[in-house]
Structure formats: C-alpha cells, structure tokens
Image (tube, grey):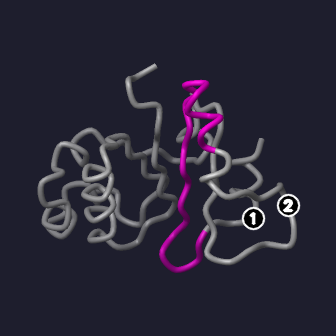
Amino acid sequence: MPADPTRFVLVGTSHAGNVGAAARALKVMGFSELVLVAPRFPDVLVQEESVAMASGAADVLVRARIVATLDEALEGVHWAAATAMTPRDFGPPTGAPRELLPVRAAARQKVAFVFGSERYGLANEDVYRCHA
C-alpha cells in the first residue's frame, strides 16, 4: 500500500477546470491519487483549462487515471465514502468523516472519497456501490 492510502474519485466530470482545481486541492492537502470515472471528455487531463487550474499540481494530473466504471476506480479500496450535498432518506447508513476516518486511518486502510458529477451528483447505484 502506498504511504498515503487515500484516493479521490470523480465520477462523470464535465468541466475540465474542475478537474484541474481538484488536482490542485489534493496537492495542497498533501494527497496525490486522483481517479476519474467516465469523464465527459476523454482528454480532460491534458486540456488547457485542466492544466491551468491545476497550477502547481501538474504531477497529480500526470499520475491521474481515467477508468470506465466506479468498480474499477474502487479496486483495492477497503472503504469508500460517497459524498452528497443533501442528506438522503434511503440507502446505506450515513456518517460524518470526522467520526469515521480516525478508525480507518489507524488501520491504514485504503480509503476513497467519491464525488459525483457537477450537474447531477452521484447516482443512487453509485452510492450503494460505495457501501458494498
């Protein structure tokens, strides 16, 4: 397992600038593993806007992977957190990262934070997949 067991997964991204900004945010926080699931543009990692918004985090973009499915993005992950803007009244149990992450970090488990598209968030099936 790499020194940093944290992966960030972006599902169905549609704006190149957001991919670059995410890479920059990861770098600033000390993270480096970025995986994109079926982005709108297959060349998003090299688009001018992505590279510009990644300012100082080009290494994160270069190492980022693009995969076709969320299952591929979660390979090797022990625990995945599906993020949501609003609470959901269905599905897997919810919890705040501040409560759950210390246990995962202590166990050095590979964790993933999964974010949905800018327009629609995560599909219900993706939320369930993160809990499997």
Q: Residue at x 55, y 33 (%)?
A: 105
Judged from the image, the secondary structure of the residue bearing numbered disc 2 is: loop
Dot 1: within a 10 Å radius of its alpha carbon, few (fewer than 14), some, or many (20 or more) residues? few
In the drawing, what numbered circle is on residue 124?
1
Earlier residue among tags 1 and 2 = 2
Q: Quick check: 70 left or right of 87?
A: left
- Of residue 65 and residue 97, the one placed in the foreground of this image is 97
Q: Please tell me in which quadrant of the rendered image residue 87 appears.
A: bottom right
Disc 1 from disc 2: Cα separation: 8 Å
Q: Residue at x 63, y 51 (%)?
A: 81
Label 1 close to label 2 by CB (< 8 Å): yes
Looking at the picture, does residue 43 appear above or below residue 17? Answer: above
Dot 2: within a 10 Å radius of its alpha carbon, few (fewer than 14), some, or many (20 or more) residues? few
The magenta-colored residue range is 101-121
Q: Which of label 1 and label 2 is nearer to you? A: 2
Q: Residue at x 56, y 38 (%)?
A: 111
Judged from the image, the secondary structure of the residue bearing numbered disc 1 is: helix
Q: Position of residue 50 (x, y in %)?
A: 22, 64
- The answer to whether residue 112 is magenta is yes
Q: Position of residue 64 (x, y in %)?
A: 32, 43
Q: Quick check: 36 left or right of 50?
A: right
Name which residue type carries label 1.
Answer: Asn
Name which residue type carries label 2.
Answer: Gly
Residue highlighted by disc 2: 91
- Of residue 51 and residue 33, the one placed in the foreground of this image is 33
